[in-house]
Amino acid sequence: MGVHVASQSPSKSTIIKDRTKILIYSFIFILLIFECESSSSKDENRERDALLMFKMSLKNAEAVLRNWNNPPRLPCPRLGSSRTTPPWRGVICLNGNVCGLQLDCLKLSGDIDVDSLLELDKLRTLSLMDNKFEGAMPKFRKLGGTLKSLCISKNNYSGNIDDDAFLGMSSLKRLDIADNRFSGEVPTSLASSMRLLELRIENNRFVGTIPEFPPTLVKFNASNNQLQGRIPPSLCDITDTSAFSGNKDLCGPPLESKCDESGSSSSPNQIVSKANENMSILHVISVIISCLLAIATLVMVYLQLDMKRDGEKDGVTVATTPKGDGKLTFFRDNYGCFDLQDLLRASAEVLGSGNFGSCYKATLMDGHCVVVKRYIHMTNCGKDEFHHHMRTLGNLSHPNLLPLIAYYYRPQEKLLVYKFVHNGSLSKQLHGDRTNEKKAGGLNWPTRLTIIKGVAKGMVYLYKKLPNLLVAHGNLKSSNVLLDKWMQPLLMDYTLLPVVNVEQAHNLMAAFKAPAFCKQGRIDKNLDVWSLGILILETMTSQKLPSTHGSELERWVETIEREKVFDKEMGGTENAQAQMTMLLEIGLKCCKVDEVEKRPELIEVANKIQQLDEKDI
Ligand SMILES: *[C@@H]1O[C@H](CO)[C@@H](O)[C@H](O)[C@H]1NC(C)=O
């Protein structure tokens, strides 16, 4: 299901309203995570002058870069000084230095003065996407071996790119020159960036063959050029062949078209002799072998990266993280490129602070929002163990699980970065101020049943994927069920038991508030079923749960069982009423206190839920 973070712009009014709060939290946030590193004012003046020089080389910059001005303003506000002055527009700062420029979609043009950027020695990312630059590609190579990400897609650059244009740019991880009018051959110097992870050259006019790239490449697109010949072995495991579509004559795996001897695609009406056929079989075998070799190399490089990541202080991440930063480790690369410093610079809005940890919504500079959750009760878990478990979580993917995008490890605290979704939590929808939204049809019966069905699906997925865990979710409750803009539920805070301090579990995690656990201290595999039951009762009645665990919860369940009062807001016809009663019964069955053994299995419950009918006829 494609809920796109990009489409969620921050609510400006909330941000301004909570300004003071934001300031305080941003400040705490920074103190918590970052060892401050002050920069000399000499540096700052140098950076300011460099940027002003750079700006002078741009056309149409005066209006859009109005806040790039002379003293007293500096490109990056100094740490410790008042945080009310933001950095200059499009300037990404780290520890008071310029580490990135992101000047996308500003209708800029002109002859970029690359030399001026040489003065920015902390510059790691440069993005000039979707502007009006034209002519030959500037000599970015001068920026040398420290630049990690360069995006100049969606401009009008044209002409050949020198073969050595990227020579020596050994740190480059991401290069995006798509959607221009570049012609000539793809420069082979790109192959010298041994760290290249992402390369996009689609929608240009490149001709010739695709050069061999380092096996680090994980994202590649060369579609809609005029490329031909054999696809190099390093790219043969790209499964989405749209990366090669719209070219003149590409052949070989992963495409279906075979290459003939000369390396060009064999056309179907060619007469193939027996000998040729044998040749091509040999060819195919050799290609398969080289592909296998390439895959093996790839796997080895990854293992090495992983080992490095685990063993090193200065972690390697799959994203473009400047060296020396806190290490955000990424799982998913389609959530915009951001780093820890972007998170820190982001305006943070507190979403909630439970006993487990606080939760922030961070709005990145490019408008993307993410949810950052901070955990402090994970200190018993060793580093390797933690990384290992996070990788397990990062591999989970289901439409009803909130995707984990990245995490950050420190002995005393952990940050998990999740995708942001729009409608807040189920808890907020059930118990929050609903006077405004309500009338728009908010949480009617079909919506509630859809939510419960989605939750059940997510839970079943967790149990299928993690058969070895007794309690696969562990913290299912309405505040951990987020709702996207179509009111589809997304589970959050799942599967943390293996890394949480066990002695705290009963204070922290919903499943451990189950009377069965409180009374007998027994972790049985149906604790999650109990949580699901509670969630169903809460959703159907909109009754708030008592804040304590154990007997008070028992009484809460008993009251609901006795009164069976649905939330009137649900509406519903007679048929719907019958379905509602059935769902409530399922919920009550999950919460049976005395008969843990008789409590149904999750699969069983889920099946029953899926059979219910939301049609309100
Ligand atoms: C490559 O780019 C083309 C054109 O922009 C797009 O349609 C296609 O989905 C992309 N494929 C991949 C694998 O990124």
Image: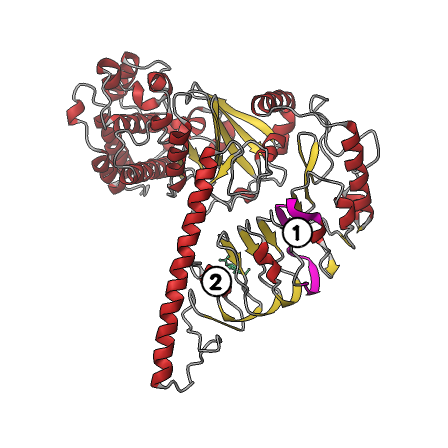
Residue under the image location 66 percent in, 60 percent down: 164
Q: Report the front residue among 36 and 360.
A: 36
Tag 2: amino acid: Ser
Q: Is residue 405 visible?
A: no
Q: Position of residue 109 (x, y in %)?
A: 76, 54
Magenta stretch: residue 146 in it? yes
Q: Residue at x 43, y 18 (%)?
A: 355
Between the residue at mark 2 and the residue at mark 1, the CA separation in whole angstroms equals 22 Å
Residue that badge 2 annotates: 242
Give the numbered dot on residue 247: none
Which amino acid, mark 1?
Met
Residue 443 x/y as whole percent = 41, 34
Q: Is residue 605 left or right of residue 104?
A: left
Q: Residue at x 65, y 44 (%)?
A: 146
Place residue 455 in its image quadrant: top left
Q: Which residue is mark 1?
A: 129
- Note whether ligand 1 is within 8 Å of mark 1: no
Q: Nearer the viewer, residue 528 or 298?
A: 298
